[in-house]
Image (cartoon, helix red, strand yellow):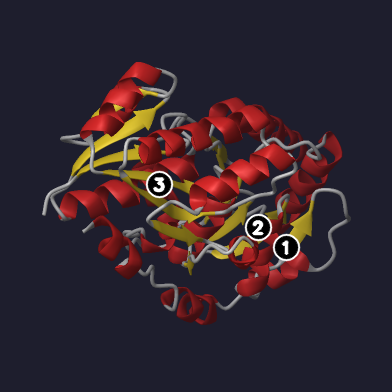
C-alpha cells in the first residue's frame, strides 16, 4: 500500500554521511512505491538529487506542519539527531518535528539513530517521553540500545544503513585517499605529522584529499595539501571538494588506501576494499576501527607502527566481516506497512 512519508534529518547541508543515509532511505521507499517529502535546509538541492520527491525547508514550520498533516508516516533519522552535544537547539528542533508527527496522529519511525549524549535533563525527559510514543524505534549502537532499555523503550539494534550502499567495482589505482575534517582537537601539529608520514610512506603514490563538507573540512584539507607539497613537491596531490555522493563513492572505490576521519568515509572504504587507517576523533570511529581490526591514530598522540599495519592489512579478512553487515529492514517494513 502506497504511503505518504515525510523524512526528517540533517539533510540538505551536503554532509556526505547524512546525504548517503537519505539516499538509502529514498531508494528503499521508492522501491516500495511510497511518496516522499524531505525536510531539507536546501530543498532545491535535495530535489535536484532525486526524482519524484517533494521537499520543504527546515525552518518553514507551516510547510512542515502541512507536509506532516498530509502524510501517513514520519521518519526521523538516521545519524545522531537526538543529542545535545552539537547544540540544545538542534535537539529541540528534531524533537519538535517528532512531536508534530505524534500530535497529528501519524506513525513515527526512529530510523537507525544514535541516541545521546543528553546532558540537559529536560531534553532527556522530553526525548524519553516522545520516543515511548513512536511506532518503531531502531538504533545503530549498543550504547543507544542500553539507554532506551533503561527508559523502558523497545528498540532494534541495526548496523549503519550506509552498509547497504552499492559500491561499483573498479581496478585499484596507485592512490592514497585522505579524508579530513575540522574538530576541536584538530591542530597544526597533527596535520604536519600526518603530512610527514604520508610523504615518507607513500612518496610513490598519488595523494587524493577529500573535503566531504566544505564548511567543516575544506580548510583542514587545504592545510594538509600545502604541508605535503612543501615536504615533497614531486608528490602529485589532488584536493576534491563539493563532490556529489556518487562522485565520492566512485573515487574511493578506486583508491588502494584510505586514511579516513569521518565515520561514513571509513564505512565506504570498507565496502570498497581499501586498506584503511582510521583517525580517532569520536568514539563511534574508535568502535568501528576496533570492530574491523583497523589501525587507528589519535589527533594528540604520536604515531607508532600504524602505517606498517596499514600496508600489511589483509582486505580479504576485512571484506568477510563487512559481508556479515546486512541491514535488517524487517522491523521498518512492518512499521511502515
Mark-to-mark CA distance, 2 and 3: 17 Å
- Check disc 3 and report the residue beneath it: 20
Q: Are marks 3 and 1 in contact (CB under 8 Å)?
A: no
Return the residue at label 1: 296
How far is mark 2 from mark 1, CA to CA? 9 Å
Please provide percent x and percent y for residue 212.
Answer: 52, 38
3 or 1: mark nearer the eye: 3
Image quarter of the N terminus: bottom left
Residue drawn 67% across and 31% down? 87
Q: Earlier in the sequence, mark 3 or mark 1?
A: 3
Place of residue 337 in the rendered image (x, y in percent of width and height, measured from the top left): 21, 59
**Relative to 291, is 210 above or below?**
above
Picture residue at 27% right of the left edge, 46% below the top:
26
Say whether marks 2 and 3 touch (CB < 8 Å): no
Q: In this view, does 259 lie to the left or right of 27?
A: right
How far apart are the two marked residues, 3 and 1, measured between alpha carbons? Answer: 24 Å
> Does residue 282 sit above or below 43 in this rendering?
below
**Marks 2 and 3, the one that precedes in the sequence:** 3
Percent from the top left, x then y, of residue 293? Answer: 65, 74
Secondary structure, mark 3, is helix
Q: Which residue is drawn at 77% across and 58% down?
A: 297
Badge 2 or badge 1: first in the primary sequence: 2
* Helix, strand or loop status at disc 1: strand
Does the residue at mark 2 contact the one at mark 1 (Cβ under 8 Å)?
A: yes
Question: In this orientation, does residue 336 appear?
Answer: yes
Q: Callout 1: 10 Å neighbours few (<14), some, many (20+)?
A: many
Q: Name the residue under label 2.
A: 285
Q: Is residue 97 left or right of residue 63?
A: right
Residue nearest the viewer, comparing 40 with 248? 40
Amino acid at each position: 500500500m502506497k504511503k505518504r512519508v515525510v523524512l526528517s534529518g540533517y539533510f540538505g547541508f551536503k554532509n556526505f554521511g547524512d546525504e548517503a543515509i537519505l539516499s538509502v532511505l529514498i531508494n528503499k521507499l521508492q522501491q516500495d512505491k511510497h511518496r516522499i517529502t524531505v525536510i531539507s535546509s536546501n530543498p532545491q538541492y535535495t530535489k535536484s538529487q532525486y526524482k519524484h520527491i517533494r521537499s520543504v525547508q527546515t525552518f518553514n514550520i507551516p510547510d512542515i506542519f502541512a507536509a506532516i498533516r498530509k502524510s501517513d508516516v514520519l521518519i526521523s533519522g538516521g545519524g545522531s539527531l537526538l543529542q545535545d552535544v552539537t547544540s540544545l537547539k538542534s535537539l529541540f528542533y528534531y524533537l519538535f518535528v517528532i512531536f508534530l508527527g505524534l500530535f497529528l496522529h501519524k506513525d513515527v519511525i526512529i530510523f537507525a539513530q544514535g541516541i545521546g549524549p543528553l546532558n540537559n535533563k529536560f531534553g532527556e525527559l522530553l526525548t524519553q517521553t516522545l520516543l515511548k510514543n513512536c511506532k518503531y524505534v531502531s538504533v545503530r549502537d549498543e550504547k543507544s540500545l542500553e539507554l532506551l532499555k533503561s527508559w523502558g523503550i523497545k528498540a532494534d539494534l541495526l548496523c549503519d544503513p550506509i552498509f547497504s550502499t552499492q559500491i561499483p567495482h573498479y581496478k585499484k589505482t596507485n592512490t592514497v585517499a585522505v579524508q579530513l575534517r575540522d574538530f576541536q582537537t584538530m591542530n597544526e601539529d597533527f596535520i604536519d605529522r600526518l603530512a610527514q608520514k604520508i610523504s615518507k610512506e607513500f612518496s610513490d603514490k598519488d595523494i587524493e584529499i577529500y573535503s566531504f563538507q566544505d564548511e567543516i573540512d575544506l580548510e583542514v584539507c587545504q592545510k594538509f595539501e600545502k604541508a605535503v607539497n612543501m615536504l615533497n613537491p614531486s608528490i602529485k596531490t589532488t584536493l576534491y571538494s563539493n563532490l556529489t555522493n556518487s562522485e565520492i563513492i566512485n573515487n574511493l572505490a578506486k583508491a588502494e588506501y584510505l586514511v579516513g576521519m569521518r565515520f561514513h568515509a571509513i564505512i565506504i572504504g570498507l565496502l570498497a576494499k581499501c586498506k584503511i587507517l582510521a583517525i580517532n576523533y569520536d568514539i563511534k570511529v574508535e568502535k568501528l576501527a576496533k570492530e574491523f581490526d583497523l589501525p587507528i591514530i589519535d589527533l594528540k598522540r604520536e604515531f607508532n607502527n600504524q602505517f606498517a599495519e596499514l600496508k600489511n592489512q589483509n582486505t580479504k579478512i576485512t571484506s568477510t566481516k563487512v559481508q556479515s553487515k546486512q541491514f535488517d529492514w524487517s522491523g521498518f517494513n512492518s512499521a511502515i506497512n
